[in-house]
Image (spheres, helix red, strand yellow):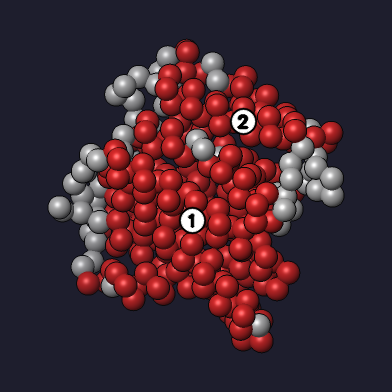
Amino acid sequence: MAGGERLYDPAIGMLLVVTGMFSFQVGGSFAKLLFPVFGPLGTVSLRLWIAAIVLGILVRPWRAAPDRATLKLIFWYGASIGIMNMGFYLSLERMPLGVAVAIEFLGPLTLSLSGARRARELLVCPLIAGGLYLLLQPGAALAGHPLDLLGVAYGLMAALAWAAYIVTGSRVSRRIDAARATALGQAVGAALVTPLMFATLPVAIVHPHAAFLACGVAVLSSALPYTLEMLAMKRLHPRQFGLLTSLDPALATITGMLLLGEHLALAQWAGILCIVLSSITGVLAQSPGARTAATLPEI
């Protein structure tokens, strides 16, 4: 199959998306354990560089140079990966995993709504607003984790970058194969955080066990899920992709509870449920031929 061809295979596509989401959340949980050693930005730099090196060795994307238009898309795709991860880790440092992912998830959710063509597709907006209120109201904060406005701001930055990642990733996946696209995108993202990586290397040398865990985080949070998502984008309609990724905040909340001991207040669980339901409702309300990323202008 040529790199730019689309192979519709929903069963395989769904398995790829779910596996990628689970891998990302487990990797995020492990990454949070590294924050006391490397800090969130240091952890991001190690993760992106390790993933870029691993993918570069396995894929060797330099064997065939993409055309100029594809290179432009790859640059924005890689930049969105770097910014998304920096914003998410800075947010994760200040908030539970489930809340950080729920805020970041507003990016793809807003992207989906931006392609709405009928009024009923916008009926989910009150549900989104209610979910945010339940998540972020001071009275809903869990014990020992008060609401952090800077963390919310970082989460919104990650949300914008996630939307850009979906748009550019979908377009790149139609031009070159998934593995090459992911490897090149990771390389761009790693290049953006090179100063942070050099500042973190001395710490990694004196903490080899933490550096080894960072290697695992790179595979679980970058190399594996991004490749799986690129493969899934070829096999699923955007509506199907949106339905599956709607489960991401709930999966993050469960993972954070099991691996990090982060127990949310009942109101926050309700807020996450509202955001999940709003995404599912928004996707189902779209017309059968509606597409999300493809309706946006070229970057």
Question: Is 12 or 206 nearer to us in this picture?
Answer: 12
Query: Which residue is the site of mark 1?
Result: 23
Q: Position of residue 220 (x, y in %)?
A: 48, 62
Classify 10 Å Cα crowding around label 2: few (below 14), some (14-19), many (20 and above).
many
Q: Is residue 153 visible?
A: no
Identity, as a three-letter code, of the amino acid under mark 2? Leu
Q: Quadrant of residue 250?
A: top right
Which secondary structure, mark 2?
helix
Using the image, determine if residue 264 lies above or below residue 20: above
The answer to whether 139 appears left or right of 38 in the picture is: right
Q: Residue furthest top?
A: 119
Using the image, determine if residue 92 lies above or below residue 234: below
The residue at 66%/61% (across/down) is 32
Question: Is 248 or 174 nearer to us in this picture?
Answer: 248
Classify 10 Å Cα crowding around label 1: few (below 14), some (14-19), many (20 and above).
some
Q: Position of residue 293 (x, y in %)?
A: 38, 37
The residue at 43%/52% (across/down) is 20
The residue at 50%/67% (across/down) is 218
- Specify which label sits upstream in the sequence, 1 or 2: 1
Query: Which residue is the site of mark 2?
Result: 273
Name the image quarter holding the C terminus. Answer: top left
Q: Is residue 255 visible?
A: yes
Identity, as a three-letter code, of the amino acid under mark 1? Ser
Q: Residue furthest left?
A: 1
Q: Position of residue 277 (x, y in %)?
A: 55, 26
